[in-house]
Image: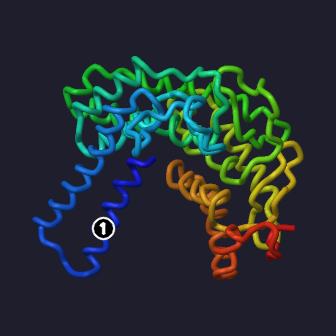
Amino acid sequence: MALKNAVLAACVSLVLVAVVGAITRAEKQHYKNKVVEMFFHAYNSYMNFAYPADELMPLSCKGRVRGVDRSRGSVDEALGSFSLTLIDSLDTLAVLGALDEFSEAIQLVLRDVRYDSDLVVSVFETNIRVLGGLLGAHFAAVALKEKGHHQLSWYSDQLLEKAEEVGQRLLPAFNTSTGLPYPKINLLRGMEYGDVDKTTCTACAGTNILEFAALSRLTGNAAYETKARRSMEAIWMARHRGHDLVGTTIDINNGQWTRKDSGVGAGIDSYYEYCLKYYILLGDTEYLHRFNKVCMTTFSHGRNVCEISWIRETKTIRVFVK
């Protein structure tokens, strides 16, 4: 994720330059090279100093190992001892045309990475970063092989097999009466761990359908898409029927909002994103309709909706969902 943010920052600089005035072909190439340089500075630093840990700690130049380094609380629930940064980087290597490195990175994932650590991880983060990363790299590898790139001539759907393993490990989180998934799961033991959270945020429950639908279409196993759609439907059914806004957190067992404040920030944002992208990916117009409804309501409330999710709960706030 950090690597992709670095690439994004460089791209934003290109936009800012463009606003000042037209840039020359040479300048475009300069900034393109800068993006590649920034990526490989981060990627090579991770591979040289942190791999196979999930993350590189930039000040100490050491890998972050969950359970060994000082805990960052829920932030560490993205770490599952599955070389997260390497998986995060796979599709970027393909996009940048670094095909030798892309092929080598895939082989490292296939050789070294396991998905059965006895750790409780975020379903949301594991889905978008690990499952999504494996699927994105699989699509890229297949496309490059079909185009005759020799670096991927050996590839034969191995990443898809790993993606299905991850999907299988996440599925038990969706076995609830409402269809809303638990926010966390143990990679080895499933839902058999300590105190299980009874609430989840809208984004956590509504940001699975792209990866799960893709996995279903690729494997022929409809269970993934079915469960992700059921979760999306549960959120939509709980919306305010007057203006279609959704709350921030919801009870997994009864489908009732536990925080009724709405907004477009953290905790909700990617639910809207996935409504639109599911339509783009698979053409389901119902999800486009939902996205448009929420947009219209958001615009009608102006800046209040944009700010609502950042106001502390101890303050008096306008509640949009009742």
Which residue is at the front of the view, 50 or 20? 50
Q: Residue at x 21, y 57 (%)?
A: 32
Residue at the spot of label 1? 13
Would you call the spot at circle 1 few (<14 residues within 10 Å), some (14-19), or many (20 or more)?
few
State the image quarter where residue 125 is shown: top right
> At which x and y percent is residue 249?
77, 55
> At which x and y percent is residue 128?
54, 43
> At which x and y percent is residue 149?
20, 31
Residue 303 shows up from this direction: yes
Q: On the picture, is 313 further left or further right than 301?
A: right
State the image quarter where residue 90 is shown: top left
Q: Residue at x 64, y 56 (%)?
A: 271
Q: Residue at x 31, y 32 (%)?
A: 48
Q: On the picture, is 111 further left or further right than 235?
A: left
Which residue is at the front of the view, 309 or 72? 72
> At which x and y percent is residue 248?
74, 59
Farthest top residue in view: 111
Residue 135 shows up from this direction: no
Q: Amino acid at mark 1?
A: Ser
Q: Is residue 285 above or below residue 105?
A: below
- Secondary structure beneath dot 1 equals helix
Q: Is residue 152 above or below residue 11?
A: above
Farthest left residue in view: 26
Which residue is at the front of the view, 42 or 322? 42
Tell me the quadrant of the picture where the C terminus can be found. bottom right
Q: Residue at x 81, y 36 (%)?
A: 176
User: Number of labelled discs?
Assistant: 1
